[in-house]
Image (cartoon, coloured by chain):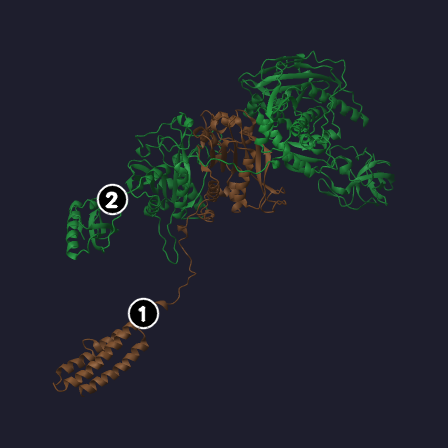
Chain colours: A brown, B green
Amino acid sequence: MSLLEKSELIKKEFETDHLAAIDAAKPEAVETLRLAYLGRKGKLTALMEDLRNASKEDRPAAGKAVNLVRHHIEAAIDELKSMARSWELAAIVNRAPIDITLPVTEDRSVGSIHPVSLMRQQLIKIFRTLGFTVVDGPEIDFDFFNFSALNIPDNHPARDMQDTFYIDGAEKMLLRTQTSNIQIHTMMNEKPPLRVIAPGRVFRCDSDMTHTPMFHQIEGFVVDENITFAHMKGTIDTFLKAIFGSTLKTRLRPSFFPFVEPGAEFDVECGVCKGKGCRTCKDTGWIEIGGCGMIHPNVFEAVGYDSSRYSGFAFGFGIDRIAMNRFALPDLRQLFEGDYEFLGNFPIHSN
Amino acid sequence: MQISLNWLKDYINLDGISVDQISATLTDIGLEVEAVQKSAAFGDTVVVGRIVSAEKHPNADSLKVCKVDIGKPDHLQIVCGASNARAGLDACVALVGTLLPGDFKIKEAKIRGEESFGMMCSAQELGLSDGHEGIIELTTNFKPGTPVTKAMGLDDVTLTLNVTPNRADCLGHIGVARDLSARLGKPIKVPAAAPKTSELSSKDIKITLSTDRCGRFTAIAIKNVRPVKSPPWLKQRIEAVGMRAINLLVDATNYVMLEMNHPIHAYDERDVQGRAFTIREAKDGETFKTLDGNERLLKSGDVLICDAERPIGLAGIMGGLNSEIKDDTTGIILEVAWFDPDSVRATSRRLGIHTEASHRFERGVDISTGDRVAKRFAEILQKCITELNAAGATLPMPEVAHDLSDQFPVKPQPRLIALRISEAKSFLASPHLTIDQIKKMFEGLQIRLADQGPDRLVFEIPTWRVDMERECDLIEEIGRLQGYDKVPYQLPKMSLEPTPEDALIGFTEEARVAMASRGLRETISFPFWSDADAKKLRLPDNHPFVPSLKLANPIADDARWMQTTLACAMIKAVQNNRRHGLKGARLFELGRGYYDFNAKPLQRNAFSLFKNLDRKGRHLSLRAREEKSRPTERHWISGIIDQPWTQKSWDAANTQTTFFHMKTQIFAWLKSFGVNDIQVHRIERDDVPFLHPGASAYLFAKGQVIGWMGELHPGVAISYDLEPAESPMLFELDLEAVLDASGKRAKVHTESFKFPPSTRDLALLIDSDLTHDTMTAAIGKFPQKKNLRDWHLFDVFQGANIPAGKKSVAWSFSFQSAEKTLTDPEIDGEFKNLTTYLTSTFKAEQR
């Protein structure tokens, strides 16, 4: 067979193999095809070998034909190679779909923040927008800071309002019953104007279904010249609306706390019945939130402020109950049992 | 404090005002109504029935067949067994369908052949008393068919008031009426207190006050008294407010107390030896039997009322068993006294006796009304006897002395308080207030205007208002009487100057969120330890974590001590979760440790890890910082990671939690605050004895110990019911120390390496106690270091083929230059030097 015929034959064979490789649509087929023709033992490589051995007179014509075939095959294989890349991608893309509903098993890598902390964070956020600074104070304190300086002298019946834990063998040392001790520490260190909140743990010697020996309060106070009852009312209304919703009404009721005069308790309209009366609010239409009042001049005098120059108001309320309401929790004591599953109900960030 | 609405109406006309309005008004003026309770009523099926005829039962001698008019056209036939059933009598008829006390339902019945449609009731059957006096005979003239509840005055409403401790005057009905009067502008009617008096004198009653803790003692003699049952109205009133009716003499003392807020005491005159009272302080160790039968151990400072021989009353708290009213009492001496509130309170609190009397005395009763109170008591007594006699009794009229024996050594000075009108207006932001309005309010409160100036009203404070001391107290009265709702809403206009804030405050909140982001759940626990916890944690007696602050009145025996570390709370939390079958909990808490380093000085040298534990606490006033006996509080963040780390699942095997899981979380947490340069050191000695000695460490950053971590000691695990082979990992960090470390910024590396790195691996056989930190430090000091940039350990192996006392470690070294791509010979040369350096430094063998 002449070289011309041979090259014709190879070209024909290549057409068939080329089509087969395209049909196979596999990157490996392209390599097989390349080796079959252009490899060391490939058909075209053998033909080139034959061409080298051909007679001088045959060579130009044969060479032309063989080279044509060679260019044709090389071009076709180059083209196949680029097709092979897309076959490869298609193979990855067309992989069998996974079961996306398989469960996440590393649930334990998700932490959470305690609901009381979430509530406190939110309250702090609200008060900061009103320009309040956050302060803290000691949890074990002396009678002076927790009671006497707050106009609650020894043996005052107002002490019955709070069952106090006392430290054994220490003169007048106790666990603070209210965050109000922070008022005294703060006022002793700073001069007015003051616009401060003090969240913290407080302790009362009481434990039943609705009381825990430790709970959380947030205290706030504002001191400056010319602070009035109306300012207290406005501030309390503003933060209550920010916490509970701007459509709910708020009210102040006269009450008594020795460190304020006049004193009040503040309520927010029951969000469940919108003030109509229901089980949640015991048919009153209101939810009691906390106590407040105009800081008593005796308190100012105890910390060395000029009570004829300065006036101010203070307010305080429990966080735990609000958190329970917010998260619809049935049992107060559950908050302090460290139940890992219960704690998993809560997020890390609150809004 | 409970008040009866019917009773209240004796003093103020409340016609046309609904119970809801009254209760809202009381709440609005500061006498919060906590509960509204309608009296035990029978509904409308127990009605007044007039007996029209009462014939003998044809088949039973003891029964009568009655026709009863119940206000309907047809008369009802009722068979009745009471002997007093007779024509013309108004009886209480329980109609068919009524449910009487004791779940007794009235049904149609045939009694010995005669039909009966209801029952005429006795007081006992209606649950009103326990006597057997036949059926009730109604004396008031109500139309047949009227519900008995109304006819008998049972339509009362009891209001439970939350009377705040400052308002002692409102612990009596008159005080409440007075407050209502000031708000409603209606007058109050105060009873006359004018008994018929006799020749009898009280002057032979000798009173000696030998302590100033009794400010006044008044006595009145009353003879011809009988401890009979009180008339129904008195009983009902006493019971409506939650007290027990006993006999007329006792009930009348209670009645006067509930009316005028003045506790009084009636002694059987036979028991007052020598008709003499001495009021003195008790001697230390003296005992006295109060009328509840309890022997009380007294201390000096307690006040006793004594007769010529012996104590007969514990002043202001409770009478004595030896002088109480008896069945045959015929003469009494009534005591009306005033005792020092502090003293009553101290005694009552110490002895744990809280009585209606002590409750009032410690809040403050009116010192100036002793005579009125005594006379009011006598008046009630006489009124009741008159009524009982009118209803058929034949009791003698009590004979009331025409005078009093009264010791009142120091009469109180009139208290005058001035009110600036302008101040009241601006303080309450109520410019609309007029002088006349203000005057009217105080008039209503029966507070006398003593003087008046252009911007000034001076009031004389009555002796019953013990709460009023300063101008602000007067302003409060104006505020609550006009109503807090009249004050406008305003926001203060203040300088923006902020109050300084301690950095720890914000840091604490960030620390919390960052720790939760490491996969731990925040818990909050009570900071109390039991007596046993320190032992269970293997703490030697002198360890700083042994609690030093003990509660005098713990809530329970296992919550007696203030915690020093949160570790115990963390362990108990895991114990609690495991008890519920839950393993693998990862918890953390931010809390405080409490220490009394004055009582128990810090053993600085014995426990060097904690040598800074007694530094001054935060959040203290300057004054508090100087107090020598003040306890110390430390702020901890503590956490626990239980076993296992992962449980078997479709994509993970069951793996145990290791020290390094915890270390990873802590380091990542610290790094999020810029604390990069952290060192861990093995805990020398036994500084943290509740951790495993071979798997525990303390953390060190910027020259300070910042905390500790480790596996829970198996012995401690067992003490808390945890499997020792499944000990959780535990850590605790000092928030203040971490905050300090985070404030010191580390050097920032700004050079960038743009040429590719090459790595070489090296496996070495080294001594098994050679630590990673030691090797890292040595590599850092590699003397021929040129392009070595980074290195990390990628394998540690001990076991098969490794000789005892040795371990195989494999390191990966990364070489990189900032100037060019390194060639293989350059890298190989440096790597060869490094290999030689390491093998010789650590006597290691290359593998």
Residue at 41% x, 25% y: name it: B627
Q: Residue B574, relative to residue B270: is it above or below?
A: below
Q: Which residue is mark 1?
A: A88
Q: Nearer the viewer, residue B272 or B380?
A: B380
Label number found at residue B773: 2
Q: With A136 as the anchor, is A295 left or right in this view?
A: right
Q: Nearer the viewer, residue B512 or B554?
A: B512
What is the residue that sits farthest to the left in this orientation?
A56
* Percent of width and height locating residue B448: 66, 23
User: Is any part of residue B654 visible from this angle?
Assistant: yes
Quadrant in the picture for residue B577: top left
* Percent of width and height locating residue A260: 54, 30
* SS category of the residue bearing label 2: helix
Disc 2 and disc 1: Cα gap in Å? 47 Å
Do discs 2 and 1 share a chain?
A: no
For the residue marked with disc 1, what is the amino acid? Glu
Q: With A268 as the anchor, is B119 left or right in this view?
A: right
Residue at 22% x, 75% y: name it: A35
Chain bearing mark 2: B
For the residue marked with disc 2, what is the amino acid? Asp
Query: Neighbour class for label 1 at 10 Å: few (<14), some, many (≥20)?
Result: some
* Percent of width and height locating residue B495: 47, 35
* Percent of width and height locating residue B327: 71, 23
Q: Residue A329, relative to residue B284: is it above or below?
A: below
Chain bearing mark 1: A
Quadrant in the picture for residue B78: top right
Looking at the image, is mark 2 or mark 1 nearer the viewer? 1
